[in-house]
Amino acid sequence: MSGTPHGRSRALNGRERVRPRRPEWAAPEYPPGAIPLPVLAAGALSAPGSAQTTERLVGLDRELNGPGWSPEMAELRERGAAIRRETLADLEGYLAQLTGRVEANGGVVHRAATPADGRAIIAGIARDNGVSMVVKSKSMATEELHLNRHLEEEGIEVVETDLGEYIVQLADERPSHIIAPAVHKAQADVTELFGQAAGEPVADDPNALASLARDRLREDFRTADMGISGVNFAAADTGTLTLMTNEGNGRMVTSQPRVHVAVMPVEKVIPRFTDLATLLPLLAHAASKQTLTVYQTMVTGPRREGEADGPERLHLVILDNGRTRLPGTRYEEVLACIRCGACQGACPVYRTMGGGHGYGAVYGGPIGAVLSPLLADGAQHRQLPFLSSLCGKCYDVCPVKIPLPDMLVDLRADYERDRRGGRAARLAWRAWAAAWTRPLVYRMSLRAVRAADRILGQRLLSRFPGARVWTRTRALPPLRRVGAFRAWRRKRA
Amino acid sequence: MPDRVALFATCVGDLAAPGPARAAVEVLEQMGVTVEVPAGQSCCGQPALNSGFPREAAAMARCWVATFEPFPAVVTVSGSCAGMVRHHYERILDGEWRRRASALFARTWEFTQFVAAYGEELRPRLEDTEQGTVTYHDSCHMLRNLGERQAPRDVLAGIGGVRLCEMRDPDICCGFGGTFSVKFPEVSTAMADRKLDQGQATGARYLVSADAGCLLHLSGRARARTAAAPAPRHIAELLRDALAASRGQGELR
Ligand code: SF4
């Protein structure tokens, strides 16, 4: 959907000229479940540019995850994992402490139980402050709120200022990766997109494209009424909100406009300011193998007397969206996530589908397949845990050691337990287990398969439900050799 | 070295690929081990677990433990199944069964682990050097649930005349993933193609693995696709053939 053509934003100038090319499932508000997941996954795989993206992602994975954990980084990882679990052991306690500190620092804290609450709170802040233009730095929590669309409906212009987010905003898409939202776009795509927005061809050169964006965004930082940012870590003991960016846009968004709204899901809280010494380098390393991001912006309250810049008002919106149900369950550790995106780039399924759009959710990849069904609106995403080959690479790269593969397995069990019409499948598996735990019946089942092969032949066998799908692209194994190993043993004995 | 082992042939060995189990028996016997194949064995339960049926998987797990418990050691020709026993049994079993499973796991070996540990007397050699270029695919569960990267490479290095040409990404998943392969066939197939293409790029004749599941998938794809691919082959069969060749019996194929 295109924004207001003649708004104040310079960055969004010409947005209406962009000819949308995205598949419907890449849209910011793709309604989950609108396309059956297997169809969606196949569509993402064969979408134009998808194969190219796969190659880029594979190269990136080699670069980022090839070396593995050095002893020093492994130690940092242990410390980070421990801090995150310490947080979860008393999540509400730390949130209360954080709230107290932020308020003492002069900020206002809101708790949003649902995305709708979050939208209403932020729209309310905008109204109260007469806001007509917002600049945003990267925030996945606001994606959960579908905030941009909502604010636009209120007549407010919203400008994404993270370069990747800016690209997907112009293209009317949602991020396909947690920290690299436009990872599914090739350079040529960006050149074309920027050219359309500019109304004239632009140079097909990364530096030129970046400065074009910088140029268009610069003015908006100065003229926006409100900045909306995410939060990477919120220290409970000092109330300091830390943002990590490589572009410095986080610093602009949190310091230039007169109102700053920071949005975080509950789990972004950490016990102590000093924990940042562990978590900042850990996140930078996991995300992009940097020692540290180029900017760490630390916000401790709005502008004080005598300070040169900073917002007049600071609001912190803490989003729940079903998360506080998780502590104490076997999925508690998913809240340890620090949103580095490493599990996404490391996932061969994610890469093969050319990024995260094929998951049909706000969060794609392994973390998305685990988190999405656990959020308040998770019912639409309960099949996502099956969209994994369970290769386990996500656990290897996760900086806080979340057992994502085990959770995927457990979530599958939850799905099968609860789904309607699941009884037949359960009975079938029960019968299978009953048969295969009895040697005689097991051997009879082997014989039955061999007989079926002899009588029906492979052609007919390939028409059975599971086999039909398998044989579309793969040959069946030669079933005449069913039981051959046992027969060979008997003959020798 | 345990002088008596029970071989776990796996359900894939019974249903689709009897070759590796047979080869493993022959290799183990050459090592001087008495191999038993307990009649009560069937499947480790992984298909049920990964499909969302842990209770049914637990029934299989208890059966597996009871079947193999009487033996001093267990050897399996599938890294994934060994990984299931090691990683998942303690998650789906409880109480006494969990204790029994972990005691049994302590003496459960994936085939190449056993050969790497006790097979130094073997002198396998492939005469025909054309046969000898292989590339190795790490099964995800063997690599990550079992933590085994080295043993199969040691075994390959011990075969005279075999040259291991590592593919670009030996540890990327082949896309099998059990039910994943039929729930998301296009994605699964694309992953297999990447694996086969990388294998092909090494110029290897065989794409060797130690996991029955991956091999089932990769051979199925290799036979169905038009692009060339190295022949997927279980490491036990390669080793058995090399042993046969070095003894002049020539069971090459
Ligand atoms: S689950 Fe782990 S690897 Fe994935 S985004 Fe979260 S912290 Fe990073």
Image (cartoon, coloured by chain):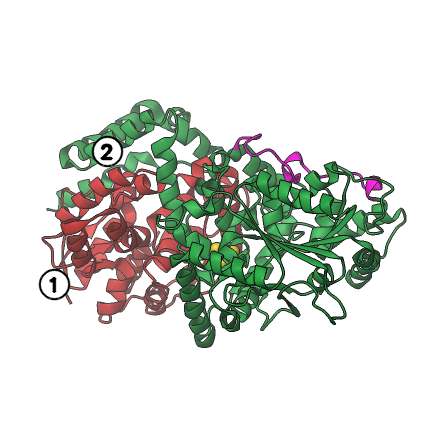
The amino acid on which the numbered mark 1 sits, given as a three-letter code, is Asp
Instruction: Determine crowd level at label 2: few under 14, some 14-19, many 20+ residues with C-alpha closer than 10 A.
Output: some
Q: Residue at x 19, y 30 (%)?
A: A444
Residue situated in front as seen by the camera: A7 or B242: A7
Residue A290: % across, % down: 59, 70
Residue situated in front as seen by the camera: B138 or A125: A125
Locate residue A339: give its quadrant. bottom right
Q: Colour of chain A?
A: green
Q: Does B51 sit above or below residue A161?
A: above
Residue A465: % across, % down: 40, 27
Q: Which residue is mark 1?
A: B3
The amino acid on which the numbered mark 2 sits, given as a three-letter code, is Leu
Q: Residue at x 14, y 42 (%)?
A: B40
The residues colored magenta run A15-36
Q: Which residue is mark 2?
A: A446
Magenta region includes residue A180? no
